[in-house]
Image (tube, grey):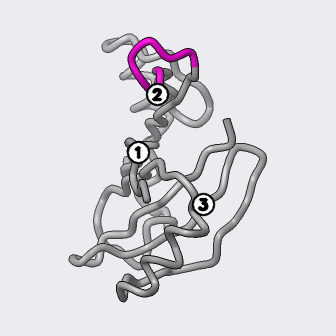
Amino acid sequence: MKRVTGIGGIFFKSKDPKKLTEWYQKHLGLETNPYGATFEWYENSGDTKKAQTQWTPFSETTKYFEPSTKEFMINYRVENLDALVEELKKEGVTILDGIETYDYGKFVHILDAEGNKIELWEPID
């Protein structure tokens, strides 16, 4: 069974997310949106199926990364999130919440071996 298929997003804390996003837009040319920036790419070489990776600065006071105390959180793209969560439970991985479904995909949060919060995302393409 495939597990992680790519990086779905990079999220990190910032003193001023709006100002930082504007800096990246001005100086590094990121095409920004209210959520940061979205990078589009293709699943496989020669493929027509687009995928995306999200880049988002969060407020330094966000609670979204808890219980991790780190300044960042990585979102990994996965296939078949339901089956993966069942396997992770069997392997003793800490699952922080239930799978939530939105119009752009399914999400769940887990902890890695060092207590870093990780977001798993099965996109709806």
Q: Position of residue 106 (x, y in %)?
A: 65, 57
The residue that label 3 is drawn on is 107
The residue that label 2 is drawn on is 43
Residue 46 is inside the magenta segment = yes
- Decide if residue 32 is on the left or right side of residue 102: left
Q: CA distance from mark 1 to mark 2?
A: 9 Å
In this rendered view, identify the residue nearer to me: 48 or 105: 48
In this rendered view, identify the residue nearer to me: 40 or 67: 40
Q: Position of residue 83 (x, y in %)?
A: 56, 69
In this rendered view, identify the residue nearer to me: 122 or 20: 122
- Decide if residue 82 is on the left or right side of residue 13: right
Q: Residue furthest front?
A: 1
Which residue corresponds to the image point at 50% horizontal and 28% vertical from the top-left? 37
Residue type, mark 1 in image: Thr
Q: Which disc number belongs to residue 5?
A: 1
Task: Give the residues drawn in magenta, as a range.
Answer: 42-48
